[in-house]
Image (cartoon, rainbow, N blue to C red):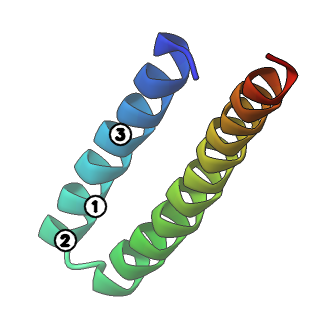
Amino acid sequence: MELQDVLRVAGVGLILALLHVLLEQFGKKEFSFFLYFIAYLYLTAELLRFLRLFFGDILVFFQWLNLN
């Protein structure tokens, strides 16, 4: 995981939060809910990708320990 990945997730989160607030103010609560749901799915997918990378690194570390 690199800093670029973290900044991308943070940027998407900020944009979606702003859109959520704007839609709430304009009275489009149903669109705001769908935006929140899509953001939740996106962040869940990113979290799963980060976890896959993390456990891949853990696996490499344990393989390295096993060789020594």
Q: Identify the residue position indicated by label 2 in the image.
A: 24
Picture coordinates of residue 4, whole percent (x, y):
52, 13
Residue at horizontal 37 percent and vertical 50 percent from the top: 16
Element under disc 3: helix
In the displayed orientation, state which residue is furthest to the bottom.
Answer: 30
Say what amino acid the circle numbered 3 marks.
Ile
Q: CA distance from mark 2 to mark 3?
A: 14 Å
**Residue 55 falls in image quadrant:** top right
Question: Which mark, by number, is residue 20?
Answer: 1
Which amino acid is tagged 1?
Answer: His
* Numbered mark located on residue 34 in the image: none
Where is residue 1 shown, x and y percent of the image? 58, 23
Horizontal side of residue 40 vs 49, given as left or right: left
According to the picture, the residue beneath numbered tag 3 turns out to be 15
Query: Looking at numbered disc 2 in the image, what kind of residue is underneath it?
Result: Glu
- Looking at the rendered structure, the number of numbered marks drawn on it comes to 3
Q: Report whether 7 appears left or right of 2.
A: left
Quick check: marks 2 and 1 in contact, CB under 8 Å?
yes
Residue lying furthest left = 25
Report crowding for label 2: few under 14, some 14 to 19, many 20 or more residues within 10 A (C-alpha).
Answer: some
Towards the viewer: 64 or 23: 64
Percent position of residue 10, x then y: 36, 33
Residue placed most toward the observer, 29 or 4: 4
Q: Depth check: give the residue in front, 43 or 33.
A: 43
